[in-house]
Image: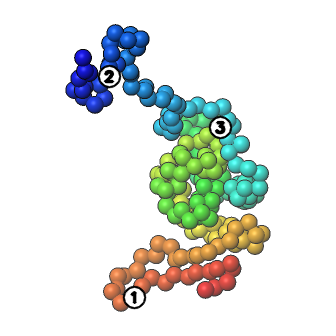
Amino acid sequence: MTATPPWFPDEPTLPADPSGEGAARTVRPKAAARVLMTNRNQLELRASDLESLVPPGHRAQLVWGYVERQNLEGPYAGIKAVEGGVGRAAIAPEILYALRLYATLEGVGHAFGTTRLTQTHDVYLWICGAVQVNCHTLADFRSQEGDALDELLTDSVASLMAAGAVKLKAVAQDGMRVRASAGTTPTVWAAQAGRAA
């Protein structure tokens, strides 16, 4: 008796002589290998302190140390929540100022982008130190402090550059409203390693 060809190519085949020694065995397809594959969407809780997120000597630590030495009496004077009183505690001006200064050094110029980084980036998480900051708070801090904050930021960047902590690659004029004109472009200054380009 001749063996009939299988109906489907993947179907296991019987031996040609069913009365022979291999009658009880059938040829089975090889099973797929079982392996552990990456799953980077898996949420994990890791025991870690915020201090370990930033190595010693990191730029963020230099910025924080610089901010701690600044006179922030102006921002503190505007805080209405006081010890023994009612109301929600305000975010320390040191945190808001350090976020603004570090974001400026990293080229992030708007409150929304900075806020997103405070939720995802280790350095910004370290600066916040488990304090939740939203974009409205950052924007309000900038608008309320106005010229004083801009002057402080300018002095801060200049001091950090003089100390060699940062290198400024580009400086641009910020937010001045001018009448639109098709023939003119806004003035932009650039500096490379401390020299005007």
User: Quadrant of the image for the N terminus?
Assistant: top left
Mark nearer the viewer, 3 or 1:
1
Q: Amino acid at mark 3?
A: Glu
Q: Quick one: label 3, few (<14), some, or many (20+) residues within 10 Å?
A: few
Q: Which residue is mark 1?
A: 184
One can see residue 16 in this view: yes
Helix, strand or loop status at disc 2: loop
Which of the 4 quarters of the picture holds residue 88?
Answer: top right
**Mark linked to residue 83:** 3
Q: Position of residue 22 (x, y in %)?
A: 40, 14
Relative to 82, does residue 28 appear above or below in the rendering? above
Vertical order, 185 against 18 (above or below): below
- Amino acid residing under circle 2: Thr
Dot 2 or dot 3, earlier in sequence:
2
User: Residue 13 — which label?
Assistant: 2
In the figure, is residue 189 to the left or right of 65?
left
For residue 108, side relative to residue 27 (left or right) = right
Camera-nearest residue between 100 and 30: 30
Mark 2 Cα shell of 10 Å, populated few (<14), some (14-19), many (≥20): some
Q: Residue at x 66, y 52 (%)?
A: 94
Tell me where residue 23 appears, x and y as whole percent: 37, 12
**Horizontal relation, residue 115 to residue 55: left or right:** left
As shown in the figure, which amino acid type bears the numbered disc 1?
Answer: Thr
Q: Secondary structure at mark 1?
A: loop
